[in-house]
Image: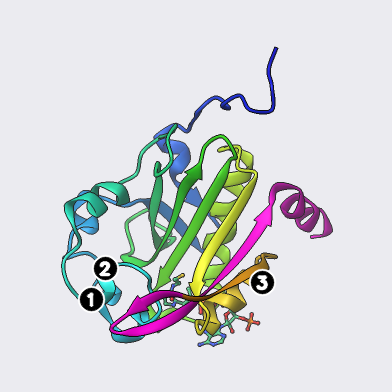
C-alpha cells in the first residue's frame, strides 16, 4: 500500500530527450567548457548579472561545486539534481549557432515534486519572445516528463523583466520576502512566483 508520504520514483530522462526544440530555438545540455568561468561572456555583463542571485554576480569564476551542478544529469533522484540548457537559434543546416542564453531547472524536493527554474539571456536578443519560448519548453518537460507538481522561480523583486516573464508563463506571485538577502551591503526583497501542474495544463488547454 502506498501512502501520501512515500517517495515518488526518481524520474530518469534519456539525455536525448533533454534536447528540446521550439519554433526558433534548440535547447541542449550545457557542456563542461560552457559551465566554466569562460562560459558565455554575456553572463558577465553588468546588466545581465544585476539581479542574479548567485556568485557569478561577483564577476568571479564559479566554484567547482556550482560548475558540477550546472552540468546536465539525466536522473532526478535527489534535491539539487537538474539540468542546465544552453539555448541557441535553430540552424537550417543543423550546425550550432552559438549560445544566446541558458535555462536551468533543479529539483528542490523530490517527495513534493518541487522544481526551481532560472534563466539568463543575451541582452542583444531581449524583447523578442525568445526567453518565453525557451522557458515554456522547459516547463513542459518539467510537468510532462519529470513529474513536477509545482515549478517556481525566485527573483529579486526589482527584476521587472523576469517578473513579466513569470506572468506571461502563467506563474502567480506567491510571496514577497522582505530583506531576504544581503548583496554588497544592501538588503534585497525576493519575490516567489510559481505555477502548478494543473494550472499549467489548464493554461495549455486554453491555448
Ligand atoms: C528576464 C529575461 C530572461 C527576459 O528575456 P527576454 O528575451 O527579454 O524575454 P521575452 O522577449 O520572452 O519577453 C518577456 C517579457 O518581458 C518583458 N521585458 C523584457 N525586458 C523588460 C524590462 N527591462 N522591463 C520590463 N519588462 C521587460 C518583455 O517586453 C516581455 O513582455 P511582453 O510580451 O508583455 O512585452 C532577460 O531580461 C534576462 O536575461 N535578464 C537578466 C538575467 C536575469 O535577471 N535572470 C533572472 C534571474 S531570477
Q: Compare residues 142 and 176 and report the one nearer the observer.
A: 176
Residue at screen point 65% across, 44% down: 149
Q: To which residue does mark 3 refer?
A: 168
Q: Secondary structure at mark 1?
A: helix
User: Between tags 2 and 3, which lies in front?
Assistant: 2
Residue 102, picture quadrant: bottom left
Identify the residue position indicated by label 1 in the image.
58
The colour style of the image is: rainbow
C-alpha distance separating marks 2 and 3:
28 Å
In x, y percent, where is residue 46? 30, 85
In the picture as drawn, the residue positioned furthest to the top comes out as 1
Q: From the Cβ of disc 3, is ligand 1 less than 8 Å away?
A: yes
Q: Which mark is residue 55?
A: 2
Q: Is residue 87 above or below residue 184?
A: above
- Give the answer, above or below, for where 158 lies relative to 16: below
Q: Which of the two residues, 57 or 191, is positioned nearer the viewer here?
A: 191
Q: Which residues are magenta?
A: 180-207
Choose the circle earlier in sequence order: 3 or 1: 1
Question: What whole-number distance in Å separates the C-alpha atoms at marks 1 and 2?
Answer: 6 Å
**Would you say 144 lies left or right of 72 here?**
right
Q: Is residue 84 left or right of residue 168?
A: left
> Judging from the image, what secondary structure is the residue with disc 2 in?
helix
Closer to the camera, 111 or 89?
Answer: 111
Amino acid at each position: 500500500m502506498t501512502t501520501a508520504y512515500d517517495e515518488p520514483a526518481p524520474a530518469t530522462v534519456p539525455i536525448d530527450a533533454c534536447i528540446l526544440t521550439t519554433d526558433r530555438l534548440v535547447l541542449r545540455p550545457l557542456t563542461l567548457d560552457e559551465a566554466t568561468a569562460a562560459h558565455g561572456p554575456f553572463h558577465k555583463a553588468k546588466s545581465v548579472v544585476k539581479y542574479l542571485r548567485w556568485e557569478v554576480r561577483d564577476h568571479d569564476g564559479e566554484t567547482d561545486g556550482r560548475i558540477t551542478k550546472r552540468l546536465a544529469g539525466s536522473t532526478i533522484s535527489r534535491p539539487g539534481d537538474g539540468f542546465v540548457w544552453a539555448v541557441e537559434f535553430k540552424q537550417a543546416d543543423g550546425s550550432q549557432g552559438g549560445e544566446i542564453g541558458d535555462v536551468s531547472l533543479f529539483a528542490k524536493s523530490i517527495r513534493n515534486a518541487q522544481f526551481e527554474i532560472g534563466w539568463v539571456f543575451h541582452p542583444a536578443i531581449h524583447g523578442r519572445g525568445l526567453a518565453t519560448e525557451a522557458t515554456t519548453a522547459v516547463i513542459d518537460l518539467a510537468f510532462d516528463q519529470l513529474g513536477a507538481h509545482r515549478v517556481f522561480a525566485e527573483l529579486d523583486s526589482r527584476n521587472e523583466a523576469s517578473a513579466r516573464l513569470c506572468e506571461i508563463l502563467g506563474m502567480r506571485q506567491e510571496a514577497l520576502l522582505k530583506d531576504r538577502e544581503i548583496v554588497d551591503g544592501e538588503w534585497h526583497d525576493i519575490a516567489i512566483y510559481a505555477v502548478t501542474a494543473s494550472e499549467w495544463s489548464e493554461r495549455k488547454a486554453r491555448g
